[in-house]
Amino acid sequence: MVNAGHVPFLGFRDTLCALLQFTQIKNMDEQTNEKKITGIGNNALIPLAIVGASIIIAGAIILSNGFSWGGNTLPEDSARVPELKPVTARDHRVGSPDAEIVIVEFSDLECPFCKTFQETMKRVIQEYGDAGSVAWVYRHFPLDSIHTKARKEAEATECAAELGGQLAFWEFTDKIFSVTPSNDNLDLAILPDLAEDIGLNRTAFEECLASGKYAARVADDLADAVAAGARGTPYSVILTKDGKTIPVSGAESFDTMKSLIERELKK
C-alpha cells in the first residue's frame, strides 16, 4: 500500500487541513462511541484531548516543513485490491480509451492539494496522453465535513459537461481550481459567471445547478472513493496494462508520477 510519499509545502493551515481530512474520512467508515470507554471520567478526557490536539499540530508543523514519508520510494502494488467501479463512457476521461495505464483520480475542488495535483496530472497527460500511454479519469470526492461548498461545485462541473460536453467539464474544473482560494473560500455565487466565461449558456447552467439533478452522481463517486480505499484527497488508483491496481494517496510530484508510469510501461 502506498504511503503518503512527498508532501509539498503548502503552509501550516493547508497541512493541518490535510491531517484533518484523514480523521474526517475515517469517521465515514467507523462511528466511534465515547460511552464505550469505561473508567475514564470527564476530567480525564481533557488531558487526552490536549495530547491529541498537540499531536495533530506537531504533525502539521513537521509536514509543513517538508518532511517526507517514504522519501523517493515509489508506490508498490497494493495487497488490497481497491473496489473500484469500472471506467466507462460515463466517466470524464482525457486520453485514449485504449491507454496502457489509466489513472483514476478522486478529487475535491476545495482541496489545496488537489489544486496542486491537477497541474501535475495535466503535465502527465501532456507527456503521455498523445502517445496513448496514459489516460486520466476524474471522479468526485467532496469532503463535506471540512469543505461544505465542494459538493455543489462538483455538481456544477457536471452541469458544465451536460451543456458543453467533456471539453467544457475539464475547462470548468480548471476554472474553479484557478479562482478558488481553497478550503471552502470560493463564493458559490460566481459559478454562473465561470460558466459564462467558458461559453456556456448562463440561464441553462443556473437552472441545471438549481435542480440538483447531479447530486446523485456526485454521491455515487464519493461512495466509490470510500470503497476504493480513499481516506483523503487527492486519491488515485492506477490501473495497469496487466490488470493490477496501485493506489496513490496524496499530491505526488510529477517526477514521482513519471517514475511510476515509466516503471509500469516497461513491464
Image (cartoon, grey):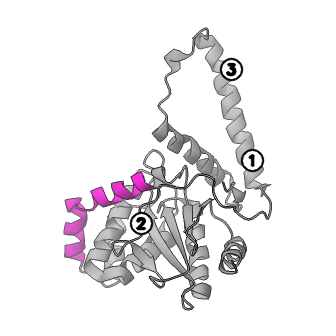
Residue located 47% across and 50% down the image: 226
Q: Which residue is mark 3?
A: 47
- Circle 1 packing at 10 Å, graded few (<14), some (14-19), many (20+), is some
Instruction: Identify the mark nearer the N-term, 2 or 1.
Output: 1
Q: Which residue is mark 2?
A: 86
Residues shaded magenta: 202-224
Q: Position of residue 208 (x, y in %)?
A: 22, 67
Residue located 57% across and 41% down the image: 23
User: Vertical placement of 130 versus 197: above or below?
Assistant: below
Q: Position of residue 183 (x, y in %)?
A: 51, 55
Q: Would you identify the image quadrant in which residue 9 lies?
A: bottom right
User: Vertical placement of 21 versus 87: above or below?
Assistant: above
- In this rendering, position of residue 15 left or right of residue 96: right
Q: Amino acid at mark 3?
A: Pro
Task: State the residue in front, 212 or 187.
Answer: 212
- In this rendering, position of residue 172 left or right of residue 60: left
Q: CA distance from mark 3 to mark 1?
A: 21 Å
Q: Is residue 128 magenta?
A: no
Q: Would you identify the image quadrant in which residue 239 lies?
A: bottom right
Instruction: Identify the mark nearer the N-term, 3 or 1.
Output: 3
Helix, strand or loop at label 2? It is loop
Q: CA distance from mark 3 to mark 2?
A: 47 Å
Residue located 48% across and 59% down the image: 110
Q: Amino acid at mark 2?
A: Pro
- In this rendering, position of residue 225 left or right of residue 76: left
Q: Main secondary structure of the magenta part?
A: helix
